[in-house]
Amino acid sequence: MNKNLLAIAIASSVFTSQAVAVELYNADGSTFAIGGHVSVALHDSENGELEVISASPRLNFNATHDMGNGFVADAKGEWALNYLTNGANAFTTRLGYIGLTHEDAGRVVVGTQWAPYYNAVAPTDKPIAYANDFTYNDHANLGTGRADKMVSYTNTLELGESQSLTMAAGWQGAHDEYEQRLQAAISYNVSAIGLNYAFTTGDVGIHTAESHIFSASYGSWGKGLYLAGVYSMGEYMIDDLAETNAMEFLAGYALSNGVNLSVNYEAVTDEVKDSTVYATSAIQAEYKFTPKFVTFAGYQFGLDGTQEDNNEWKLGVRYYL
């Protein structure tokens, strides 16, 4: 197993463009750190009025404990913050789990976590302002993003200095109208190229909600040229539609002065009606003043479907704790 897997898994955020955390304790084989970020933005709302919004702020803790014999236990809790509305619920759960990792046997995680399926989504879910809306459609129950109450297993095999193969599987129990759900994912990385596939399935009411997703990427986000694409084929995965295809394409280029420029395209199609549910494209820029302080801006064009002629923009700042 890749010995860096645990370090990646317990970082402040596994899949964001950067992870910053303050280590408060490190002694006797145990660590404890606090991380997250505060993010705010100006937003041109749907009715054309300017408003202040939050941009996915969160607070988290990460703890690890070396158990000996190659085993390391870790725990993570993460909460979304509401700091813009007086009297509203200040914290809502994003993540909460306990994991156990062995450098050869792999990693098991129990709790609310980033799902194995998301491994195939992550390559295009990079910009702060606009990216991968379709992924988060009922993602906690369907297990496409941060999956609620999941048990997962992951193992990475090193195939040489520049190659690795990661295999993962996940299970969620039944609740309400959702029956048990299963998923599996596989990723292959060689040098700067990544190839991914994931599958999820399970009954929701009288239908089977399932999806196949493929992705590919080149480079590292925030370091020079970055290219990525995702394509999914699902049934009853988006807005209760019988058959949908979704895609996201992202191209970015990070300059040496801390500016990261990108353009993306996202579309969801209803295959039964042979029509576009929505299609958008955004041009975005992020500037890293310091590793902890980042500004971002994005302008999104509504191209078709429900987003047609519904252009919008965001301008904000993110402060990593």
Image (cartoon, rainbow, N blue to C red):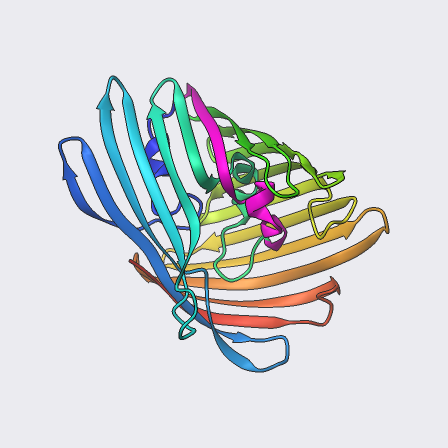
Left or right of 200 in this view: 156: left
Q: Specify the farthest residue to the bottom.
A: 49
Quadrant that contains the N terminus: top left
In the depicted view, which residue is nearer to us: 41 or 217? 41
Find residue 214 and report its horizontal and vertical position in percent. Answer: 63, 36
Quadrant the C terminus occupies: bottom left
Q: Quadrant of residue 210?
A: top right
Among the 4 quarters of the image, the one containing residue 30:
top left
Q: From this view, report whether residue 292 is shown above or below residue 217.
A: below
The magenta segment: 133-160
The residue that appears at 47% across and 59% down in the rendered structure is 128
Q: Is residue 147 magenta?
A: yes
Percent across and percent down for residue 213 are 64, 37
Q: Is residue 75 visible?
A: yes
Q: Residue 98 or 137: which is nearer the viewer? A: 98
Could you tell whether 148 is left or right of 38 in the image?
right
Residue beneath the point at 57% across and 33% down = 196
Q: Position of residue 20 (x, y in %)?
A: 30, 51
Looking at the image, which is closer to me, 135 or 173?
173
In this orientation, does residue 223 appear?
Answer: no
**Residue 312 location in percent, x, y?**
60, 72
**Residue placed at 86% from the left, 51% from the top?**
273
Q: Is residue 305 left or right of residue 44?
A: right
Q: Is residue 211 above or below residue 46?
A: above
